[in-house]
Image (spheres, coloured by chain):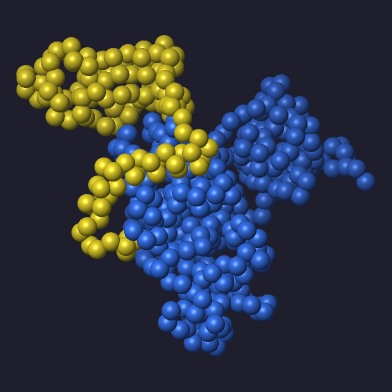
Amino acid sequence: MGGTTPIRTGKALAERLLESGAALEKFEAICQAQGGMREPARARHIHVVDATRAGVVAAFDNRRLARIAKLAGAPRAPAAGLELHAPLGTKLSPGDPVLTIHAETPGELDYARAYLRANPQIISLDGSG
Amino acid sequence: MPRHAHQDPNILRLNRLGIDTYREPVIYMTADCPVCRSEGWTAEARIQLSYNGRSIIATLNVVTGSLLTPEEVDLSEIGWQMLGARDGDLVSLEHPPPLESLSHIRAKVFGHRLSDSAIKSVVSDIVDGRYSAIELAAFVTAFAGGRLDLDELVALTRAMTSTGERLYWGHAPIVDKHCVGGLPGNRTTMIIVPIVAAYGLTMPKTSSRAITSPAGTADTMETVAPVTLDVSAIRRVVEREGACIVWGGAVQLSPADDVIISVERPLDLDSHEQMVASILSKKLAPDRRTWCSTCRSVRRRRYGPSRQRTRSSACFAPWERPLGCKSASREPMAANRWAAASGRRSKRGTCCPFCAESRRRQQICATARSRLPAK
């Protein structure tokens, strides 16, 4: 698009910029220029959801996953939402952490947990491990 | 002569109750309010309010009970903001002029083609806040589902762009990225922008906040850095780092889109036509034209260091208003069109209209490519 590198060399160029740390350095510089880089806030209440059975993470229901984050208080509470520990393809044993719900109030945390309990198919596991 | 509430029956006192209606201004009046009775207004009527030289159009909600007296009116919070009024101020009420452009919406529903000027009048009425939420919903529906041909789509995009603020950057190319989105947590902007900027290209990126999703890119970016920057701050950041990741809502790049989105989301109707016009109306706002150094210094002298203009301003960019020409069309004019209109032939290598004026300037003019940082 910028016409500054030959066709088909863009991807390698982008990877080099990522691996060399130049892109990260630029991101930090942009944050500084916009008024200062900061650590993301931590929500007051968290709850770790563990796998109840063994299996490989096969699919996520994105619409419902987004719903959990909203019930937990996103985007109004910037630190609320959820943190995924098991991307697609992860092998899980019972008790392994799958995701953590972050919320600013206990009520919102309960609300999000209840929704996940009622919709266990949000994260589908393949096989029995 | 000071006007009092009791002298003109259409002047009432504002009483702030503090009601949030998101983007639609709503006016609250009692059922037995004398103005309501004499003007024949009932709930959902559209009413024009004027205060201190400003006027807005609001939808009427009728209040029973003791929240307001018959001599008082309230506005939803967006209405107070738009009018710039304060608690206790006097406001005058009247019927708004008929909304002529609504006939174009009707024409579209019945399958007619719309002219450029018809589309322009619809968009300008939307930006002026003359459409109610119901009328906006009709607009969004009528323009969806493949009812626009290419010319109409171009006209819609042009109309939406021309009502917004435009940012000018002194060089080219200016690059951009856009994702349709839909995956929660998918944050390509925050990865792509630094890569592209680290390479030396210029990418002034504006992103949105969440409306129905758990987080927009602007929301995510805000957890690590401020994103509510005004135009001059954005310019400072981009001049220093070659890129920014800021909240687009803080600068009015496409006020029409800001309004349209507010009804599109609740309808869950993201038409392809509207999406194209919406995206382009924001992307065209950062201008991609190349300026030679002479012209940039001329612009700086003429318009000051910000070099950023609004379309409604009396002052136009040079290609829109050739030097010395007082009757220039208000339509943006590309370099070659300007050259044609002024009897000059467009020359190869010309990067802006000023260059067509003098060979000397043409020589100073550097091309976009040579301007890119050496890699």
- Chain A representation colour: yellow
What residue sits 37% from the left and 66% below the top?
B150
Q: Is residue B23 left or right of residue A10?
A: right
Q: Residue at x 26, y 15 (%)?
A: A49
- Residue B301, above or below B77: below
Among the chains pictured, the one given blue colouring is B
Residue situated in front as seen by the camera: B105 or B264:
B264
- Residue shown at 41% from the left, 50% from the top: B141
Q: Is residue A87 left or right of residue B110?
A: left
The quarter of the image holding the C terminus of chain B is: bottom left
At 72% from the left edge and 48% from the top edge, which residue is drawn?
B54
Q: Residue furthest right?
A: B1
Name the foreground residue: A110 vs B92: A110
Q: Residue B257: tell me if it is visible.
A: no
Q: Find residue B49 and report its image quarter.
A: top right
**Most foreground residue, B69 or B342:** B342
Q: Residue furthest left?
A: A128
State the image coordinates of residue A73 (x, y, percent, origin top left): 42, 22
Task: Give percent across and percent down for residue B366.
Answer: 46, 72
Residue B364 lies, with reference to residue B299, above or below; the image says below
Quadrant in the picture for residue B191: top left
Where's residue B277, x and y in %?
42, 56
Q: Position of residue B163 (x, y in %)?
A: 56, 58
